[in-house]
Amino acid sequence: MNVHDILFWVFSIVMLACGALVIFSRNPVTSAMFLILLFFFMAGLFVLLEAFFLAAIQVLVYAGAVMVLFLFVIMLLNIKASERRKFNVLAVIGGLGVAVAFVWELAVVLRRPVQSLTTGAGEFQGGLQDVVRPLFTKYMLPFEVTALLLLVSMIGVVLLSKKDLR
Amino acid sequence: MTSAITLNDYLAISGLLFALGIAGVIIRRNVLVIYMALEMNLNAANLALVAFSKFNKLPEGQILVFFIIAIAAAEVAVGLAIIVALFRRNQTVSVDDLKTMRL
Amino acid sequence: MNPVWTILFAPLAATVIITVFTQRWKMLSALVSVAAILLSFAFTLGLFWAMYSLSKQPDHEVLSVPGPSIHWLVIGEVVRIDFGAIVDRLSILMLLVVTGVGSAIHVYSLGYMKGDEGMSRYFACLSLFTFSMLGIVLSTNFIQIFIFWELVGVSSYLLIGYWFEKPSAAEAGKKAFLVNRIGDFGFMLGILLLWGHARTFDFVELQKILPTLGLSSGTLTLIGALIFCGAVGKSAQFPLHVWLPDAMEGPTPVSALMHAATMVAAGVYMLCRVAWLVLPSPEALLLIAWIGGVTAIMAATIAVAQNDIKRILAYSTLSQLGYMVMAVGLGGPTQAMFHLTTHAFFKALLFLCAGSVIVALHHEQDIWKMGGLWKKTPITFITFLIGTLALAGVWPLAGFYSKDEILLLALKQNQPLFAIGVFTAGLTAFYMGRELFVVFCGQPRDHHAYEHAHESPAVMTGPLVLLAIFSIIAGWAGEVPHFLDPHEEVVHSNLGYLLLLVPVAGFVLSAAIYWKPVPSDAPMQASLGGGWTLIQNKYYIDEIYLWIVKYVQGTIAAICEWFDIWILQRLGIGGLSVGTGLLGRTVRLLQTGSISDYAFFFSIGVTVIIYYVVVK
């Protein structure tokens, strides 16, 4: 039992608890907060997996930008926390049922012996250069396309936010 | 120090998180919370990809996660814009009230 | 071309020619038809002469001219139906009867049907009938005979319902066809049962292989009884006799030809043709004999109380047919054919005389409106007298010999049937005497009709005289039975002369009652009371049948209706429509318009797919 494993379990369990709380909180702002927390612990798991670059990106983009946007919108819409939404029992049962089914399938699959990949293995150590170099060489096209996509989505958002389309 | 955590553990966590996400989409009535559960789903997928990347010693997993994060950000922006527009129209964010189909 | 085909197809050609070409010219159509049958008769005579000469030679015992045969229907190895013609002693005799009596009646029809609107149709149907009847006689196998059997039924229907504007005639035609059909059903079953065991339809083959089939006696009896059903229908035996009296709705020459001489005799002919099928089974023979006997006596009792000149003769025909069938049942097909031949002559004669009387009195058929006609229609009277004596079995006319043969056979084998036969003979003389005396003797009962009565033209009286001559000579020297079966000796027992007393007694009795010009049957009615009502109403058999049909058919119809409404309509169609509606409405509930519901279904689908792709 070393630090690495302990940290893994801690991060994982807390993360899952946050996830549960995201779903079951009454106040949407509380849900958003727990989601931010979830992202942080996810970043922790990334670090344990030696994906430092991604951990940073996760905190910056997801927790920093996306969730802030969420909170802006929640505040903007001014949703009263006291708005009691009616508990639809059927939906709860359905949702939990689907979740349980999925988890059961997962368990079945994970019991099977893992086939490890042999090709192309070995060299990657997780350093930043090793991650980013393919990004700018092999995967240049998707990179540029993603940039374009961001532009397009920005235009879309602006358009959608207009009060009247004139 | 060799770690006792195997790939399966990471995948199990990822799977559980994904299940939580789906449950959230079905259970909650508030559109924004549903959207947040969807983000949880994406994150679960990200975790799985990074785990594979680490244990199979390939950079592709992490590169894909990079793209996913970017695209997810764009998607959130557009989605929220739609929700805002919906709210402006119907004055509600409850999924139950957002249907016009008669029984 | 083989002359046999000419005999068979000349009448068919006449039918076609009349139907297609000469319908507008009535006399021409009539002459075409008459010419055709005379042609057939001529060829038959020629064929007969050849066979007769051949039979006189000592070494020709089994006399059978090989007839032509065409393979008609062949299905693999299993079914082989030929279309052929068989010319042996039995068939040549029957051919003579059919074409001979037929020719006489065709000529007679020229006079009887003169002026009738549909004369062309009449002669076309008559030629069709002749063709069909000849087909039955010449058939070589069961399927061929069945085909012609049905054709004869069709001709009968057409001719009985000839005056179809009369509802009673149309009904009678239908009745004849339907009752016949019932008999044919049994016939067909018998044919198929036999084929199932023997795998062939041909008469000659069947006769050869029948002993080798190893059929159980039960099967043999069943086959015999079923095939006999065909004869029961066609020859109007009890219980399928009900159509024959109604068939008198047709024109009198038709009654003479079909329902006296030939068509009804087809049943007897068929039985004689396949006698080897029924002879091995004593139970079948007993059945046949008793049905014949019962028919004979029943019909004779009914005839005593009938008032229509043709109906009396119709019941008399039934009675004589009963004799013929009884003869077959007693193991004597030769005797049956002999009586068939003589009966053809005198019964046709009697019917034609009746037709002459009807025409003379302008279509009056009730005997109680006739009387004293012997002065006005002498030829008809003399020939009717000859026919009556022949029918009653008075020596030395033809009926004496043929009837006696049958009675002698009965005496040897089955005494109760002998008693029935003798009693029926007495009744025959009685009712024929009644008819003779009431119609021809004494004083006229309806003076208006009597004034206008006149003798028929020569074209009608000629055939009468011809048939009368044959009625006299046909029995002589035992030539007919000898020709049929050279091995059987003709027994002339003195008992025959003793039996002569019976018809004489019958005549005397009827003369005692009817010689004086009595106005009606009232005295008889009074003395017999309820019995008279019973026989006048034909033992109410028709009414019983109607009741049965009504209730059986009614019940079956009710069941079918219930089934149709409840099961097919409500359950089937209604169920389908309602079910589809319900199903549709149920599935529609899946479309709620709610996003989370859709998300739910979506996730279920994903889970299922993952299950089948990954987990399995």
Image: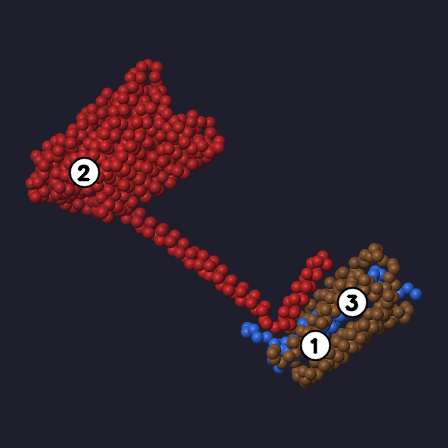
Label 3 packing within 10 angstroms: few (<14), some (14-19), many (20+): many
User: Which chain contains the residue that carries disc 1?
Assistant: B
The C terminus of chain C sits in image quarter:
bottom right
Q: Residue C274 at what x, y percent from top left?
A: 37, 30
| Horizontal and vertical percent position of residue A103 | 74, 66
Q: Nearer the viewer, residue C381 or C571?
A: C571
Q: Which mark is residue C269?
A: none
Hey, what amino acid is under mark 1?
Val
Q: At x 63% / y 72%, what residue is drawn?
A: C595
Q: Which chain is blue?
A: B
Q: CA distance from mark 3 to mark 2?
A: 112 Å
Chain under disc 2: C
Residue type, label 3: Val
Secondary structure under the numbered disc 3 in the rendered image: helix
User: On screen, A72 above or below C82?
Assistant: below
- Residue at 12% x, 43% y is C369
Q: Is residue C98 visible?
A: yes
Pointer 2 residue:
C113
Q: Quadrant of residue B15?
A: bottom right
- Chain letter of the residue carrying label 3: B
Tell me the tag on residue B65: 3
Q: Amino acid at mark 2?
A: Met
- In what element is the residue under mark 1? helix
Report which quarter residue C494 is drawn in: top left
Outermost residue toward the front in this view:
A166
Label 1, label 2: how far apart the Cα atoms are:
106 Å
For the point 85% across and 70% down, the residue is A52
Quick one: which chain is red?
A: C
Q: Nearer the viewer, mark 3 or mark 2?
A: 3
Which residue in the protein does label 1 denote? B33
The mark that comes first in sequence, 3 or 1, is: 1
Secondary structure of the residue carrying numbered label 2: loop
